[in-house]
Image: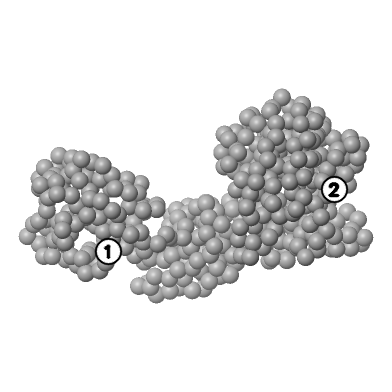
Amino acid sequence: MSFDSDVLLDRLQVLIGDESPARWLVAYSGGIDSAVLLHALVFADTGIPVLAIHVDHGLHPDSGHWATHAKRFANELGVEFINMMVVVQNKAKLGLEAAAREARYRALSTVVEADDWLLSGHHENDQAETLLLNLMRGSGPAGLAGIGACFPFERGVIARPMLGVSGDDIEAYARKHDVDWIDDPSNNDSSFDRNFVRRDVMPLLNSRWPAVTSRLRQSAVLAGEAGVLLSELADVDIATCGHADRLSLVEMNELSPARQRNLLRRAAQLCGLPSPPATRLYQTIDELIPARGDAQPIVTWRGGEFRRYRDRLYVLSPLDAVPSDPDGLLGTEGSPVILGKRLGSVRLVSAGMAGVDPVVAEQGLAIRFRAGGEALRIAERGATRKLKNLLQEAQVLPWMRNRIPLLFAADQLVAVGDLWISAGHRSNDGLSVEWSNKPAII
């Protein structure tokens, strides 16, 4: 089936369903795919405002000329246009293609407002190339599903309405409507994996199997359906094991290793973390889960980590370093003291019940983090206890014990976060420690 504005409109209506996009944002590189998308969208006459966004990566000497061309094309269509300059970082670590993609989406994310739909020109050939690349990376069903047609992005949505359209149909549209586009010379460089697949692998496959791109797209659709079923199974298992961010090892051990890995992959996704590599999933099943009960094993990957404590497995973002002790003193006026990244803040508030003695607090309390050797007497006639032992008995997560704010009057420990107040610094009409935006510590 040939491609035109009516076909695009039909595909958009399938994707949006009952939604009402505020704007169409077109990721417009100036290449043939995004140029055809922008042109066809304008003539589809949806009645929804269109914004063309060009991202200049600054990786080619002619990139400034490309931006000028993109602006002129958008102006000819009567479309609002913005050009965004980015700096591509982490090229050595991620590779140039991935680093440029990361910079591009980071820039695009700053433009997306509530209910915006960001459209990209990915098509059937891109889907086939992605599937092959993911096969070479050893991807599972999610990777073999290839490029997603529609998913949330910032406060809006990303949609790829041309995934079922062939590259030949896109070129035919461009020539029929005299669409002018830019040919990026880097697309001819087969040292990039995608270009190698596009220029060397796909033509060979197509010479043997002329319908290869549509067949690979069909395989991606089937893999996507399998991925949905695996996610649904994982959701059932997660509900049995507790919550996505903390899972019962007793219940997990009732599952097969394959279901455990499936569960962990889904739990990371639900926690907003990057998907853990297969090697880390196997390491978790083979080493972290069977570790002895008093161990504190950890499995990390870029953007996430699994930790174990007692009979639970925790799914976490990488912990930030323990911050330096906050400057200033915590007083009685209720002004909060910021503790550090993702640790919230503390302040003293009138409790109307047992709390920190106001006389003690009037002089100001210093906030410190554990250095070791701290001790506290909680009960009026009780013994002084090592803080280390108190935290263990309260089953405070080991990795959070050095991140709990300790309140000191001179060198005397007055309070441990909002957990305990020293008996010697407590009064019946005292001040409570209010810990706002408190991270999970138990």
Is residue 420 rendered to the left or right of residue 403?
left
How far is the residue under mark 1 from the one under mark 2? 61 Å
Look at 65% across and 31% down and name the residue there.
23
Q: Nearer the viewer, mark 1 or mark 2?
A: 1
Badge 1 element: loop
Question: In this orientation, which residue lies closer to the viewer: 308 or 52?
Answer: 52
Is residue 72 rendered to the left or right of residue 93?
right
Look at 27% across and 56% down and name the residue there.
405
Q: What's under tag 1, amino acid-wise?
A: Arg
Which residue position is annotated with label 2? 167
Q: Position of residue 414 (x, y in %)?
A: 17, 56
Callout 1–callout 2 Cβ contact below 8 Å:
no
Badge 2 element: helix
Question: In this orientation, which residue lies closer to the viewer: 382 or 438?
Answer: 438
Q: Position of residue 413 (x, y in %)?
A: 17, 59
Q: Position of residue 109 (x, y in %)?
A: 59, 43
Neighbour tally class for label 2: few under 14, some 14-19, many 20 plus, Cα within 10 Å: some
Look at 43% across and 71% down and name the residue there.
297
Look at 73% across and 30% down and name the residue there.
79
Question: In this orientation, which residue lies closer to the viewer: 416 or 17?
Answer: 416
Q: What's under tag 2, amino acid-wise?
A: Gly
Q: Which part of the image, by quadrant, shows the N terminus?
A: top right
Q: Which part of the image, by quadrant, shows the C terminus?
A: bottom left
Neighbour tally class for label 1: few under 14, some 14-19, many 20 plus, Cα within 10 Å: some
Q: Position of residue 309 (x, y in %)?
A: 38, 65
**Numbered tag placed on residue 41 in the rendering:** none
User: Looking at the rendering, which quadrant does residue 377 occupy?
Assistant: bottom left
Which residue position is annotated with label 1? 370
